[in-house]
Amino acid sequence: MSIKVEIGFRLNGVARRVSVPADLSALRMLREELGLTGTKYGCGEGECGACTIIVDGVTVNSCLMFAADCDGRDVVTIEGLAADKRGERLRDAFVQHGAVQCGFCTPGFVVQATHLLEKHPHASSAEIQRGIEGNLCRCTGYRKIVEAIADATPAAR
Amino acid sequence: MGATEQAAAQESLIGRRIPKMDAPDKASGRTRYIDDINVPGQLHAHILRSTQVHAKIRSIDTSAARALPGVHAVITARDVPWQRPIGVAKDHLPLKTDRVRSLRDEVAAVAADTPEIAAAAVKLIRVDYDPLPVVSDPHDALKPDAPLIHPEPHGDDGSPHLKPGAPVAFTGKPDNVAMTFDYAQGDVVAGEAESDMVVEDTFKLHYVTHCCMGVSGVIADFDPKGNLLLYSNTQVPFLHKREFAELLGIEPGRIRIIQPPIGGGFGSKLDIYPFEPIAIFLAQITRRPVKLVFTREEEFIASPTRQPVLLKLRSGCKRDGTLTFRTVETLHDNGAYTSWGATTPFVMMQTISSLYRVPHCQYHTKAVYTNNPYAGSFRGYGNLQATFAVEAHMDKLADAIGMDPLEFRLKNAQEPGEVTPQGMNFKTCGLKECLTTAARRSDYQRKRRENAARWNDGNPIRRGVGIAAMLHVGGGAKIYPSDGCGTILKIDDFAHVTLITGASEIGQGSETVLAQLVCEELGLPLSAVTVVNNDTDITPWDVGVHASRTTFIAGNSAIGAARQAKAKILAAAAQKSGLAGGELDLKGGHVVRTASNERVLELGKFIRSLHFSDKAQLVMTSFYYEPPSKHQDKQFRGDVSAAYAWASQVCEVEVDTDTGIARLLKVTGAHDVGRVLNRLGIEGQIEGGVVMGQGYALTENLLVEGGVTRNPNFRDYKLVTAPEIPEMDISFIETMDGEGPQGAKGVGEAPAICIAAAVANAIHNATGTRIYAAPFTPENVYRALHGAAEPPTWNAA
């Protein structure tokens, strides 16, 4: 069994202290230690984007990040976004535009889209497509996801 | 109900853009998929798979694994002598006894306190193998001296069995032929004799796999009385209930299957795979709940694939463009075991015999055992492969007689009222309108002429357009004793409806469309319906989510239950109001006068008054819908579906002849869907299917070499990503099917079927080169364009 590390970070706006195995991924910490199952395991190697979270304002694949590296950082997950205005707007757009089918990839897309629109509030459709390139969806064919994100830009509101 | 909702409920819901009912939860991360569920006291299971493609198992040493702290059980075939073969041909023991036949094979399994301990324990198991010669090519598998994959019986243990006479064991196979299909109509020799033009080619279709974003998983939990609760991703809960019961030798009634929301299906979850019995065995042995979830690599290696097919096609036509005959032989790489992939010829032969009118037709198939991954069912079910070949020949024959490919197709296209020699009755058929609509909206004919005229202009960047059409079942598929679905509907004291349906939801949106159909009957807003659809202890029987059947079958079932409820309410309302039942209707949450929409009774209040009266009635109904389709006879003739779906798609590609990169620019599709019920949902099905077809045509390729899957990850197995999607122009041809719910037909599989065929035709239009083997990756296209491709050859006996 690996050694444990004591870490402290902000999780969805609230300070948390946890003790985690040194080799645990941020994904597994969120899902198994903290009960936040909205972040999904899709591949475990940073290829599908289902585990996307925001760390210090930047999206990362939480499967590739050590939990210990969350120490001192600001971490936002889908549960955090779902409870805040930005997430609500995107969630409603995903729902209204039919961007959700099986829904397994959806939290990752919503998190990535939040980040995308923060950095590029006026992103064009082509830019949105580039911006979600790292997230895989097997159901929708992406078009409705792109439309949903475009509809959540400030220009569309 | 608020005023806006009441107003909305006055209008028809059919054809509107209705957001998916479970989408808000899914987009908030609240939805709990199988991996998100944890049962108190659960153990975690991990499987040891073979490291050999084909070998005898000499010995398995599990002592070190058993000694690891935190390990509760280590099992091999010896520990579960009661196990029985599973799968379509019952040729697959969950835990292998004396032999492994492919790299995915399950040799042992561990249940432990944590997933880490389980994985660590698996690494401590020592297996001594005696390698056997590997058969990785179906041609080789058919040679007289080929090593046999299933030479001996397996699974015979004499344990008691539920169904007397049912196979408890697999008897073994004297050769490597897993399954054959032979179909004939007319006289192909006579057909060829009257042909002015005959073409023959061999086509090769590759391995792809489902890549559901949610990996496979199961939780098995026995209560002290031996009843099994299974959290399962199955697409066919009621069929699997029975299969698991047979496997365990217990009464099916003692098995309850709960389907948590499923992270993608696409046909992958139509069969039982060894991981499910293995989790069940571990739960039996440890008397603890056992959870087993795949890694992505495991998902790639140990999930079923679409069936790779080698297909020889010979077809002919007259000078005037009339098709005369078609002779088809296919060789299917079955892999080491038999799942639904082996039965895809059922669907392939429909396209071969009946997409266009062909008087003379012959079809022989063989599914052949190899040491490769085994093939299952996958959206389209053989139809992508069959359509690929048939539509290539439609272009080739048209070219050969100097006819426009669209005109050639229209000349041979089916029409409403046709009963084909195979027995399919096309009561509605929009094929011709699909073809002309897709062609017109894409400017197919002009672009095709202009592209072909540029073949020699020296520009390495070429454009091409290609057309293809498809036929698929659209009103269920009667392959089981029943193709039906049950519905239970209750309306509570506040006029809130609980719709309990047998239909399974895998992301396609069935819960929304069923709620919509019920609301349409009862004059209620969607917010007045809760759908219950995932628990075999509660839901009535359904055959499962497959064959594009759910909207049609479960939809008719839901409508039936809603109409009964409506009749019950209106009869009581007539009595109360003194009006005739025929003068009343349900609209906007009220009983209204049909003629004037004048509100007579508020529905919730009226239902309460029925409940709390002397008669004390609740409004609850049940309905079972069985489609008026027929089983095929032994010659594969019969009207297996209550309706048939049609489509045509035009693909426009750009090909860089210097690099071999082919890009899909635009897909113009026209789909005969009967009628659009939920516009948002049906667009989602079509767009998703188109992009899945794009992956099949251009990017996805599961590389299996010598039985080894070389690219079991998303880095090397290329799914289409957002920047690569084509422009999509989708038209709906509404033929208003008489049997369909509100006129609708099935659509789930249709959109994926034509793409590879249309892309192949488009690449030919762009370059003048026909490519006979998919996928059209840059390497394959480059080789084909520069004379370095080896065209597929047919040398099967």
Image (cartoon, coloured by chain):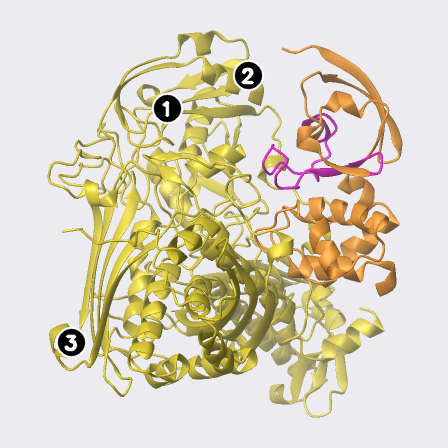
Which chain is assigned orange?
A
The x, y position of residue B604, in whole percent, is 74, 69
The three-letter code of the residue at mark 2 reads: Ile
Report helix, strand or loop for mark 3. helix
Q: Would you name the residue on which mark 2 appears?
A: B117
Q: Which mark is residue B483?
A: none
Q: Amino acid at mark 3?
A: Glu
Q: Marks 2 and 3: CB-CB under 8 Å?
A: no
What type is the residue that disc 1 sits on? Thr
**What residue is at 58 percent from the left and 67 percent from the top?**
B682
Q: Given the image, what chain letter belongs to the residue carrying mark 1?
A: B
- Picture quadrant where residue A139 is located: bottom right
The residue that disc 1 covers is B51
Quarter of the view holding residue B570: bottom right
Tint applied to chain B in the drawing: yellow
**Magenta segment boundaries in residue numbering:** A28-57
